[in-house]
Amino acid sequence: MEHGDEGKAGGTMYRLSGRPGRTFDPAQSALLVIDPVNDFLSEGGAGWELTKGTVEKHDVVGHLRQLIDGVRARGIPVLYGPMAYTSEDYADQELHRRTGINRIMFELEMFLAGSWGADFHPELQPGPDEVVLHPHKGTDVFETDLREHLERLGVTQLIIAGMTANLCVESTGRHAAEHGYDVTFVRDAIGAENLPAYEASIRVNFPLIGNAVLDTEDVLTAIGLERLPGVGDDVYASDQMKIGSIEEVADGAGGAGYILVGRGIFNRATYIPLDAVVKVAEGKAFINLPKLVIGKMPWDEPPTTEAQRAKEGPASAAVEQLYGSFGPTSG
C-alpha cells in the first residue's frame, strides 16, 4: 500500500503512514493540544491544586505558547482537544460511575460546559481558522472527531502536548500510534496531576508507545526538510537520556546504515541502526528506544542487510500457523 493508505487487521482499521520522517514535514504534520483550559492551567481552576506542581515546574503554559506560535509560523496546523460536561453526561450516562478520573472531575465540578473552567487559558486561545474538536468525555481524544480532521488535513505525523501526561495525552498517543500515526510527545509542554504520574509517562510509557519524546525547542528545530544526523551530534534515547555523540554516520542501503556512538556508558562501541534514528533536531539525534534497554540490543557491530532481513521474520505466505501450533479463531 502507498503512503497514507489504510489497511485492516483483525477487524480494526489502521492508518499506514509509511516510513516516519526524521523531521516534521509541515504538509503532513499537526500539533494536538489537549485540555489547555483554565481548570487545569489557571490559578483558581477546579483542578489547579492537583496540576500546579508540574505545570509550574516545567512552565507548561510558556512552552505551550512557544510551541503553538512556533508551529503556526512554520505552517503546521494546530488542533485543540478540550473537555466539557453537561448534566446529561452525569444524570443520564452516569459517567462519574465509570472511572476514577470521571469521579474526580464530577466531585470537583471540572470542565462544566459553558464555564470559565472549561474555557481556554487566556494565553492559549485557538486562532480563528484553527480546529476545536468535539469534547472527549473520557481520556481519549481519538474517540472524538480528531481522526476525521487528521485525514482531511493529510496528517501522518502527530505532535501531542497539553494535559494530562498519564491520562488524556497518553491514551490519545497510544490510540494514534495503534492507527499508524508517527506520534511525538512534547516533554516540557505537558503537565500532570502529580510528579510521579508525570515521570512515569515521560520516562517509562511515552518512550515505548510513541515515536519520540522531544522538548519544545527540539520540535521546532526538527521542522523542515528530511536530513540525516551528523558527526558530532549528541544522541538521545526516547526517555530523554543522553547516550553519547556520533563518531560516524554510514548511510548504507538495505538496512545496513548506522550511526556509531563510541565507548561510553555501555563500555563498547555502539552501532545504532540508522532507521532507529527517528528525529533529528539542531545538533541532536533521537532514537526510539529508552536508554535502559540499549545496552541489551545486538548493536556491538555494524548491521548488515542479511541480519536486518532475519529480524523481519518470515513472509506471511510461508507461515502455516500464526502462533506456532495455533492460529486466530475465525469469526
Image: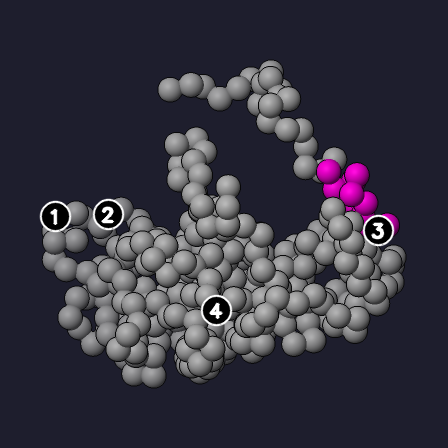
Boundaries of the magenta span: 296-309
Q: Is residue 27 visible?
A: yes
- In what element is the residue under mark 3? loop
Residue 294 in the figure: left or right of residue 86: right
Task: Estimate the spatial distance between the alpha carbons at disc 4 and disc 2, rounded to whole Å.
Answer: 42 Å
**Amino acid, disc 2:** Arg
Report the side of 315 relative to 62 (left or right). Answer: right
C-alpha gap between disc 3 and disc 4: 33 Å
Q: Main secondary structure of the magenta part?
A: loop
On whether residue 302 falls in the magenta region, the answer is: yes
Q: Residue furthest front?
A: 2
Q: Answer with mark 3 or mark 2, whichever residue precedes in sequence.
A: 2
Q: Amino acid at mark 3?
A: Pro
Residue 269 in percent (x, y) is at 86, 58
For marks 3 and 4 on the same chain, the one whose residue lies earlier in the sequence: 4
Q: Which residue is mark 3?
A: 302
**Residue at 87%, 62% in the rendered image:** 263
Label drawn at residue 26:
4
Mark with earlier residue (4, 1): 4
Q: Nearer the viewer, mark 3 or mark 2?
A: 3
Front residue of 259/104: it is: 259
Q: Are marks 1 and 2 in contact (CB under 8 Å)?
A: no
Q: Residue under circle 2?
A: 97
Task: State which tag comes first along the sequence, 3 or 1.
Answer: 1
Instruction: Residue at 49%, 22% (x, y): give it.
Output: 328
Kindly identify the residue that appears in the image at 43 percent across and 65 percent down. Answer: 30
Q: Which mark is residue 92?
A: 1
Marks 3/1: CA distance?
Answer: 61 Å
Q: Dividing the picture into quarters, in which one does residue 129 lie? A: bottom left
Q: CA distance from mark 1 to mark 2?
A: 11 Å
- SS at mark 1 in the image: loop
Mark 1 or mark 2: whose residue is earlier in sequence: 1
